Image (cartoon, helix red, strand yellow):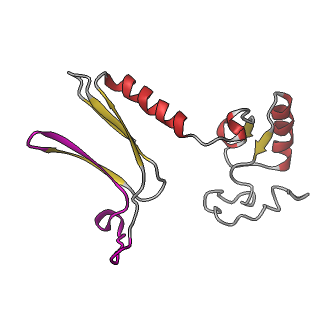
């Protein structure tokens, strides 16, 4: 996402590139004003290219642009209306579940059975429907959890009784 707003006139653009892969944006000047280029993967920035044969086609990543004459807040409101209009129906839009994640402000990647059980009970007691053991469940006690990322097997020393 990005925005370009003229603070004097209120005119501007707010944009989002609707893709989680390779993309970039450019703003530049040309004789009558400015330009905005919203781009998918390219050879120069992402070492990606595709040669098309006659009759073949390629669709770039989608983008959304809100254009305003009334400043940043108006651009955000316009893009928000667009996002709401294109959102696909999903049961979570009616009732979002409550999720407790043990990482932030609690275990910080250092879970054990003894540490988790009281947290699980407390989270359930205040209405959490899901409990997420975020980081460190795969690292043995004394092992740096970040260095063990990718092992993805439950730690035996943290959970001697096992964990499912």
From the viewer's side, name the closer residue of 78 and 71: 78
Q: Outermost residue toward the bottom?
A: 53
Name the residue located 37 percent from the left edge and 58 percent from the top edge: 40
Q: Is 36 displayed left or right of 137 in the figure?
A: left
Name the residue located 81 percent from the left edge and 55 percent from the top edge: 158
Could you tell me residue 142's position as x and y percent?
Answer: 71, 57
Question: Relative to 150, does residue 115 appear above or below in the rendering?
Answer: above
From the viewer's side, name the closer residue of 103 and 132: 132
Which corner quadrant holds the N terminus?
top left
Q: Is 95 displayed left or right of 19 in the figure?
A: right
Q: Outermost residue toward the right?
A: 161
Question: Relative to 123, does residue 108 appear above or below in the rendering?
Answer: below
Number of labels in the image equals 0
Whether residue 73 is visible, yes or no, is: yes
Magenta region, residue range: 30-56
Name the residue located 33 percent from the left edge and 64 percent from the top edge: 42
Residue 16 picture quarter: top left
Could you tell me residue 13's position as x and y percent?
Answer: 31, 35
Whether residue 106 is visible, yes or no, is: no
Name the residue located 65 percent from the left edge and 41 percent from the top edge: 89
From the viewer's side, name the closer residue of 109 and 141: 109
From the viewer's side, name the closer residue of 22 and 126: 22
Could you tell me residue 34's position as x and y percent?
Answer: 18, 40
Residue 31 picture quarter: top left
Task: State yes or no: residue 98 in magenta.
Answer: no
């Amino acid at each position: 996402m990005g925005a370009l707003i003229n603070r004097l006139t209120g005119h501007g653009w707010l944009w989002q590139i609707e893709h989680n892969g390779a993309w970039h944006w450019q703003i530049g000047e040309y004789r009558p004003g400015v330009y905005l280029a919203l781009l998918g993967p390219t050879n120069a920035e992402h070492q990606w290219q595709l040669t098309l044969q006659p009759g073949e086609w390629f669709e770039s990543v989608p983008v959304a642009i809100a254009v305003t004459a009334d400043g940043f807040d108006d651009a955000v409101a316009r893009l928000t209306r667009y996002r709401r209009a294109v959102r696909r129906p999903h049961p979570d839009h009616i009732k979002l579940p409550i999720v407790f994640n043990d990482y932030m402000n609690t275990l910080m990647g250092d879970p054990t059975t003894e540490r988790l059980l009281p947290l699980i009970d407390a989270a359930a007691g205040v209405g959490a429907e899901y409990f997420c053991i975020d980081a460190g469940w795969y690292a043995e006690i004394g092992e740096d959890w970040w260095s063990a990322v990718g092992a993805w097997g439950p730690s035996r020393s943290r959970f001697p009784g096992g964990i499912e």
